[in-house]
């Protein structure tokens, strides 16, 4: 019995050792975030479909009522085009959720036109083509992939010519449109889990910091967004508390107003 | 030096130059292709891998923190890779209180590592990447993520 017990202990130790080896060094269970000596990198702004995916898991969403594929005005100011481009890419993700092939194709064309307007059309042409082809085949996974690639290529092309600020506006336009739709859905069928998806205070601070560094973009829509982010912050930065239905409604009103501002000529 | 020795010498010199050039041109993009290689099997399981990624270079023992917004209801994998095949890297996920938040199936294998999380709350998380060991002075790294 003693021998068996010893053998068992050795086997358990060996198995644990192997598991440890496969997993590598054990990570500490706790770290002091406030004393992180390492540099913290910027956030990667989540794609709208990352939020929509989480929203879908909470219950069926009628995505068709959120599809928007109208052509909209043509702007000449590059910051306005960048914001609109981000919003239109987000519209693409909504149209994919709704599995609306004609809307996806229209959005593909619109993305290309906007990208040309901002001087990065060349890097987008193959993606726009791929979006339209995948929509024709109703291959929604490929459409999602190409929308992600589109946003990435637009931003890379902008970064290469040191237009990082415009690149950030593309992300902001997408985030605002995503938040508008998220709050619209949660407002209709309120749940604490749905409202919790709005808990994005660091992302909001990130956009606030970026906008502050763009004094050269002296446009009414940029000022409206800055003011709106100040108003939204206390509504979503609630720590461990729940975000109430009233806050969701307010964020929806604010983001809907901004959404209209982004697609409408002053 | 006879003809054969000359050819052998020139070939060796050329090979050494190619290797040296490859080493000097190694970049974060190379690291990214390794991170994507680690992600490949998970795509078949329905994970959508983002095109965007983080990258840079670190010395042995150095760490980097990446802050990321995650959504409750989604499941995420973060994949770390480097082109330095004798390097050892690690990636771990902590919540905003500094508590280890990753699943137990997270793994490290030489110059690849991956961390898995099913967030219990929506909010900011910290992804800590580290080059544990490396024969290079600075080691390129790239971190990609996917969700489903």
Image (spheres, coloured by chain):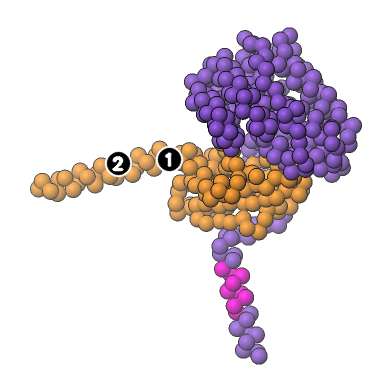
Q: Quadrant of residue A228?
A: top right
Residue at x-position 71% and y-position 36%? A52
Query: For the point 76% across and 39% down, which residue is it?
Result: A60
Q: Position of residue B128 (x, y in %)?
A: 63, 47
Q: Chain of mark 1?
A: B
Chain represented in purple:
A
Residue B133: % across, % down: 51, 54
Identify the disc placed on residue B26: 1
Give the crowd class for mark 2: few <14, some 14-19, many >=20 residues within 10 Å. Answer: few
The orange-coloured chain is labelled B
Q: Main secondary structure of the magenta part?
A: helix
| Disc 1 secondary structure class | loop
Q: Position of residue B17 (x, y in %)?
A: 30, 41
Query: Quick check: is A180 in the magenta stretch?
Result: no
Instruction: Check the image and name the residue furthest to the bottom.
Output: A1
Q: Which stretch did the figure color magenta?
A: A10-18
């Amino acid at each position: 019995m003693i021998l068996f017990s010893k053998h068992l202990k050795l086997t358990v130790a060996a198995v644990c050792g192997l598991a440890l080896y496969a997993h590598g060094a054990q990570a500490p269970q706790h770290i002091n975030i406030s004393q992180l000596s390492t540099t913290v990198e910027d956030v990667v702004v989540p794609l709208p479909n990352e939020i929509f995916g989480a929203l879908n898991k909470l219950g069926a969403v009628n995505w068709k009522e959120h599809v928007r594929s109208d052509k909209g005005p043509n702007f000449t100011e590059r910051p306005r085009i960048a914001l609109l481009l981000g919003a239109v890419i987000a519209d693409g993700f909504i149209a994919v959720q709704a599995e609306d092939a004609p809307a996806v194709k229209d959005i593909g064309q619109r993305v290309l036109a906007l990208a040309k307007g901002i001087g990065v059309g060349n890097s987008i042409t193959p993606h726009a083509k791929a979006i339209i082809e995948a929509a024709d085949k109703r291959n929604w996974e490929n459409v999602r992939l190409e929308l992600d690639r589109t946003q990435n290529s637009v931003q890379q092309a902008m970064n290469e010519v040191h237009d990082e600020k415009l690149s950030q506006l593309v992300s902001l336009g997408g985030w605002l449109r995503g938040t508008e739709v998220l709050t619209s859905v949660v407002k209709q069928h309120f749940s604490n889990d749905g409202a919790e998806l709005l808990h994005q205070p660091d992302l909001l601070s990130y956009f606030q910091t970026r906008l502050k560094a763009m004094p050269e973009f002296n446009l009414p829509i940029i000022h409206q967004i800055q003011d709106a982010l100040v108003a939204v912050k206390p509504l979503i930065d609630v720590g461990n508390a729940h975000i109430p239905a009233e806050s969701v409604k307010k964020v929806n009103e604010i983001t809907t107003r901004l959404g209209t501002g982004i697609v409408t000529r002053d | 030096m006879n003809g054969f020795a000359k050819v052998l010498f020139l070939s060796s010199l050329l090979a050494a130059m190619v290797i040296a050039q490859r080493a000097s041109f190694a970049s974060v993009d190379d690291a990214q292709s390794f991170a994507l290689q680690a992600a490949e099997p998970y795509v078949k399981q329905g994970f959508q891998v983002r095109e965007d990624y983080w990258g840079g270079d670190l010395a042995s023992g150095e760490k980097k923190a990446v802050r990321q917004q995650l959504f409750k209801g989604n499941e995420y994998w973060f994949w770390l890779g480097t082109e330095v095949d004798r390097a050892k890297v690690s990636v771990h996920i902590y919540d905003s209180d500094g508590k280890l938040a990753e699943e137990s199936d997270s793994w490290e294998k030489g110059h690849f590592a991956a961390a898995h999380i099913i967030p219990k709350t929506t909010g900011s998380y910290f992804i800590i990447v580290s080059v544990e060991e490396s024969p290079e002075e600075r080691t390129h790294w790239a971190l990609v993520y996917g969700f489903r």
